[in-house]
Image (cartoon, helix red, strand yellow):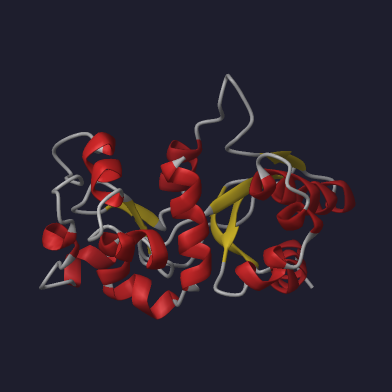
Amino acid sequence: MTVLAHLRSGLKPHGLFIMGVDGARVLIGTDAGWWDVFAASAEHDDGAADPVDRWSKRVLGTFAAEMGAQASFPSDGPPYAPFIAWVLATGRFWQSPTGMMIHDTAGLMISIRGALVFDTPFAADLYDGASPCVTCADRPCVTACPVGALSADAPYDVPACKSYLDTDAGADCMGAGCVVRRVCPVSQTFDRPAAQSAFHMAAFHK
């Protein structure tokens, strides 16, 4: 079994999968099964700060130690590792028409938990490199945001987004996740649990 095949097999019971590979760097994110795993963890229930980051460091840190890799996490810093540059370099992420990144299988439901860096580079992913947005004729994400907070041509309007979340109408986004992320056809095939989206929205809205 190759290193990547071994890693894929080991990650699956934790609700994790390889989202992209760039040389010796392997980017790892959550799949549709992650929420159930995390919800049953000590980090979820202990009441301490940053439960997802702590869970990620425990689980991926174990993989790094066992496989002789170095682990890096988006929460490490400052200085922070250039995760956006890293994921774009894999050829499996692109900027969507909303300005958010889109992944070939996760759509707009991207949750990178960390990266493992090995001593030896891996062969490039076999994905053909075309953004799913290219063949998305309707592009429902462009008009889905009720307050126009997301655009490829302007910074994310966080105040407008959070103000909307405080309204009765914003309860849908708070409870089921950002409507822009949900209307993406690729996101819909990824099937992230609503409870996970609600958890992330609550953390964002603090």
**Residue 161 picture location, percent across and down:** 26, 44
The image quadrant that residue 29 belongs to is: bottom right
Q: Nearer the viewer, residue 202 or 28?
A: 202
118 on left or right of 151: right
In the rendered view, tell whether residue 65 sits above or below residue 40.
above
Question: What's the residue at 73%, 42% (across, down)?
Answer: 48
Question: What's the residue at 18%, 44% (across, down)?
Answer: 152
5 on left or right of 203: right
The image quadrant that residue 135 belongs to is: bottom left
One can see residue 179 in this view: yes
Q: Nearer the viewer, residue 112 or 50?
A: 50
**Residue 78 picture location, percent across and down:** 58, 20
One can see residue 130 in this view: no
Question: What's the residue at 56%, 26% (across, down)?
Answer: 80
In the rendered view, tell whether residue 193 sits above or below residue 47.
below
Q: Nearer the viewer, residue 77 or 27?
A: 77
Q: How many marks?
A: 0
**Residue 102 picture location, percent across and down:** 34, 57
Q: Give the position of the N terminus as an image quadrant.
A: bottom right
Q: Given the current orientation, which residue lies at the most extreme front position?
A: 168
**Residue 21 picture location, percent across and down:** 56, 54
Question: What's the residue at 89%, 53% (across, down)?
Answer: 66
